[in-house]
Amino acid sequence: VTGSADKTVKFWEVEAQEDESSPMLVHSRTLEMSDDVVAVRYSHSTDPTKRMVFVSCLDSTIKVFFDDTLKFFLSLYGHKLPALAVDASDDDTILASSGADKTIKIWGLDFGDTHRTLHGHQDSVTDLRFVRRTHNFFTSSKDGTVRYWDGDRFEQILILNGHFAEVSCVSVSRTGAFVLTGGMDRQIRVWERTKDIVFLEEERERELEQMFDGVGREEETTGRLLLQKGEGDSGDEGDRDEPQSEAAVKRSVLSVAAGDRIMEALERADQELKDIASFRKTNPGK
């Protein structure tokens, strides 16, 4: 099945040739859509009467049709920009979609309701694939990362860094033992599953530390540029006083948590002072 900007979804069948040469794709059916088609995907059911076709359109909706009759079943609304990829779990109970709006949405296929919207990627989410016999799935993004998600708990499990440019596509093996990703850095990377135990809290802390490190580097670069600009503007006016303060520490999860505790202690002390002043006002002789 293929989808196109000509507002059609075309279905093809593989037919063998009489001369036993390579098989050919023969066009069998056409489904007319009201808008350009961005992505199209089959469900996993082996029953032709239950098999579904998911079509993502340029109007940011996802249409669901029955494969045997092409009868309309559901229309899924929620993405602010078109969904770039869709995929269903093996049991066809949930559908996941990734969009140009940087979000991932999980839908129920019984009534078309939105189970959850997941955030994490910093740019458009280009592809999405479920791991067989699970509700876990991988996503790729233009932010250069590949992420692993739990579709039942609606949590991010892992971030896989390695590509140097946007990641265009992802594919998962039948057993889920390895994942392949391709990116605009002209690389195809193979990620193998290990027996290491993943602790979600540690993964979140690692992600926060990387985020703080990135912010710190940006601040250092900005400060260096401002300092150079100031030196360039001084000219022959003489040396100016150098900055008297710098960043005391590099921000990390521990420093942020310590700062939160200090703020909480200051708020408690302030409240204590207010209580003491109120007591002395109501009891002047004590």
Image: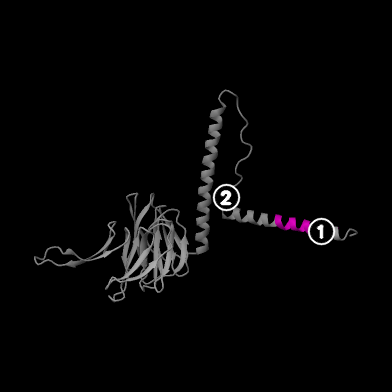
Residue sticking out furthest to the left:
19
Q: Quadrant of the N terminus?
A: bottom left
Front residue (pair 242, 115): 115
- Mark 2 vs 1: CB contact within 8 A: no
How far apart in space, not on screen, are marks 2 and 1 (Cα)?
A: 39 Å
Task: Tell me which segment is drawn in magenta.
Answer: 266-280
Q: Is residue 69 left or right of residue 137?
A: left
Residue 178 pos. (x, y %): 35, 63
Front residue (pair 210, 61): 61
Residue 234 pos. (x, y %): 57, 27
Q: Amino acid at mark 1?
A: Ser
Q: Which mark is residue 251?
A: 2
- Magenta residues, dominant SS class: helix
Q: Which mark is residue 278?
A: 1
Q: Is residue 276 located in the magenta-colored stretch of the structure?
A: yes
Residue drawn at point x = 55 percent, y = 25 percent: 235
Disc 1 crowd rating (10 Å Cα; few below 14, some 14-19, many 20+) is few
Q: Secondary structure at mark 2?
A: loop
Q: Which mark is residue 122?
A: none
Q: Amino acid at mark 2?
A: Arg
Above or below, 271 relative to 152: above
